[in-house]
Amino acid sequence: MNQLIIVEDHPDFRTLLTELIGFSGDLAVAGAFGSVEELTSVRSRPDLVLMDIGLPGQSGLEGLKLVKSRFPSVRVVMLTNLADDGLIYTAITEGADGYLLKSTPPEGILSAIRETLAGGASLTPSIARRVIETFSLRRKQPEPGAALSGRETEVLQLLVRGMNHKRIAEQLFISPETVRNHIKAIYDKLHVHTRSEVVARALKERLV
């Protein structure tokens, strides 16, 4: 069973999330905290951290950096009321694996958590649109020798949209193994090693 940590300063909403995840059947809450400072007491590695941005003391973005520095492979999903383009950009480029609004229905939150744990990237639909509109207006030309092929660019676009290997394969009518080969080529050309890194570079350098 996947172990989650919640960082949310509003007690009622923290309790709501704890109960929602606890009753899911396939997810468990390993800890629920009201601040990033409390999060520093965690010693065992969770599978995913669900974190607010507007926290007392250190912000959720600082908490994101803390988690990624201590547990690089842990998934982090920001859950917030703040639909600010600057915060979205910062969160994604700092390694966030998802960005959800608190207005997301309970089943949508659970679905997003599962999608992220399965290797996807969870974005509230309105946030996904803003990401695409804000960071995909212009495509930066890749460095000489590192140019992506047309198909690799298509795969990269779907990675940025949060799709996992299976969904990319279905979207492009190719096999999952072919998707994996394209993703390996993308990683090699962009000199990255994780999905978070490739999404961050794609957005930062406007490759899609």
Image (tube, rainbow, N blue to C red):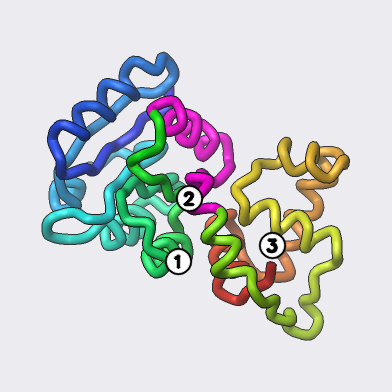
Left or right, 95 with respect to 30, comes to: right
Left or right, 197 with respect to 38, comes to: right
Q: Secondary structure at mark 2?
A: loop
Q: Identify which residue is drawn at 78% across, 58% down.
A: 154
| Picture disc at residue 187 | 3
Q: Position of residue 30 (x, y in %)?
A: 27, 29
Q: Earlier in the sequence, mark 3 or mark 2?
A: 2
Crowd around label 3: few <14 · some 14–19 · many ≥20 (10 Å): some
User: Does the magenta-highlighted stretch encompass residue 76?
Assistant: no
In the rendered view, would you say 111 is above or below 89?
above
Q: Which residue is mark 1?
A: 89
Left or right, 22 with respect to 10, comes to: right
What is the magenta range? 106-128
For marks 1 and 3, give the CA distance: 21 Å
Q: Position of residue 61 (x, y in %)?
A: 30, 61
In the rendered view, would you say 178 is above or below 160?
above
Q: Nearer the viewer, mark 1 or mark 2?
A: 1
Q: Secondary structure at mark 1?
A: helix
Q: Are marks 1 and 3 in contact (CB under 8 Å)?
A: no
For marks 3 and 2, give the CA distance: 17 Å
User: Does the magenta-highlighted stretch encompass residue 116?
Assistant: yes
Q: Nearer the viewer, mark 1 or mark 3?
A: 1
Assign the C terminus to one quadrant of the image: bottom right
Q: Earlier in the sequence, mark 1 or mark 2?
A: 1
Q: Position of residue 187 (x, y in %)?
A: 69, 62
Q: Identify which residue is drawn at 54% across, 61% down.
A: 131
Q: Amino acid at mark 3?
A: Tyr
Q: Amino acid at mark 1?
A: Tyr
Q: Secondary structure at mark 3?
A: helix
| Picture disc at residue 25 | none
Q: Which residue is mark 2?
A: 97
